[in-house]
Image (cartoon, coloured by chain):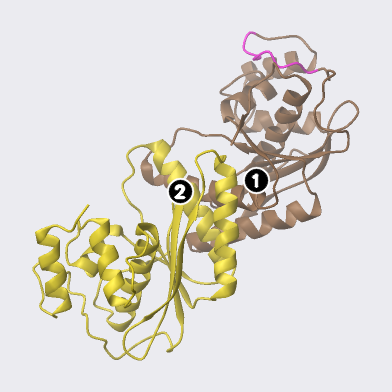
Chain colours: A brown, B yellow
């Protein structure tokens, strides 16, 4: 799966600082009014039963920097409850290794049916509970807003988001798609902290 | 809210050992083939964002006995994530105080809409992850099957279930409705362990 011409144009425009029609008004320059102290970490989580992406970035003097990211994989052969336990356990380890000042989760989406929504909700609940137990505040940003802020195009493909994450965090490789989504959430949250008029997150 | 004549008749029939048309074939007499050793605890959980019921019973030589039960209440003023953290924290305490051999959760139900299913799923995920992290197996029984097995009537009211829980566990008071639902889950699971032809639980 490649990046479409439309997505590429939007990415280029964002990188060069030109606004596009659908860029959602989020600034790419750091602005005064940063609410988290420099050095604070932001944890992004993209919860899913079989592959929960997570990513930690550190707020820098100008651009945020990469700390660590990964995907919590749970094989199809595992019972649902075992996956939920693993999501909670693995995230608790991340929270201990890199205590974040703030957490941001992928926001509500439109599930295909009730069964999907319930299972999706379970993965989110396991992840959010692990974070909330440490007392860290959780915000939510919708996938569409993340794509809009990262790629300048609300229906961008996953690979386009991953490539922007790679560039913004100066990574040598494109991160795994789920980890990239989590890092994108953290980056958009950091962007919003610099520019309160940017894409809106919602505290949950 | 009282107990309807139909529910009362079904309860009376169950208590006297007579089968009713809708009793679902679950035996009320203990049978050989108990798979959990005597003294094992079963934890029932009825997860919900604002009021998660939980109840612990102990497998006895004949009837199970009451250990402890309660409701994890989260005020409306709390953010969703704070509730999820509290569900996880409070259940971890219960798991430490009364390590169970088995856990049983209220099974899938039909939510009114996707938003409800997602929020319900989050509460379930927080609860199930706390249990799964301790390595305890989780089973699911649908609310309808619990009512059928407890009251002999699949659409029984909550109060009818609570009154049967009170009688079966020889409690001096009718338990809080959410705690009663959790105890009912544990009792039906214990019933099933004695009689594998009884109401079916599903491992999750």
Give the numbered dot on residue A145. none
Residue beneath label 1, please?
A53
Q: Residue at x 79, y 39 (%)?
A: A57
Q: Which residues are magenta?
A: A21-28
- Tag 1, which chain? A
Q: Is residue A80 rendered to the left or right of residue A18?
A: left
Q: Quadrant of the C terminus of chain A?
A: top right
For this orientation, the residue located farthest to the right is: A61
Q: Nearer the viewer, residue B143 or A42?
A: B143
Whether residue A66 is visible: yes
Q: Is residue A35 rendered to the left or right of residue B56?
A: right
Residue A140 pos. (x, y %):
61, 34
| Disc 1 to disc 2, C-alpha distance | 19 Å
Q: Foreground mark, 1 or 2?
A: 2
Q: Quadrant of residue A64?
A: top right
Secondary structure of the residue carrying numbered label 2: helix
Q: Quadrant of residue A4?
A: top right
């Amino acid at each position: 799966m490649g990046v479409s011409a439309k997505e590429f144009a939007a990415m280029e425009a964002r990188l060069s600082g030109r606004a596009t029609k659908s860029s959602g008004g989020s600034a790419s320059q750091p602005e005064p009014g940063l609410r988290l102290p420099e050095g604070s970490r932001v944890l992004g989580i993209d919860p899913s039963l079989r592959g929960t992406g997570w990513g930690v970035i550190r707020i820098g003097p100008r651009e945020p920097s990469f700390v660590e990211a990964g995907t919590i994989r749970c094989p199809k052969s595992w019972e649902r409850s075992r996956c939920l336990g693993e999501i909670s356990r693995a995230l608790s380890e991340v929270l201990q290794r890199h205590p974040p000042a703030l957490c941001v989760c992928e926001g509500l989406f439109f599930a295909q049916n009730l069964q999907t929504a319930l299972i999706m909700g379970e993965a989110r609940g396991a992840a959010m509970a692990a974070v909330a137990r440490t007392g860290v505040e959780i915000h939510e940003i919708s996938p569409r807003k993340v794509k809009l802020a990262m790629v300048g195009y609300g229906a961008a493909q996953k690979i386009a988001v991953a490539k922007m994450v790679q560039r913004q965090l100066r990574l040598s490789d494109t991160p795994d798609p789920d980890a990239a989504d989590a890092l994108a959430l953290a980056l958009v949250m950091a962007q919003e902290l610099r520019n309160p008029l940017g894409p809106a997150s919602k505290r949950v």
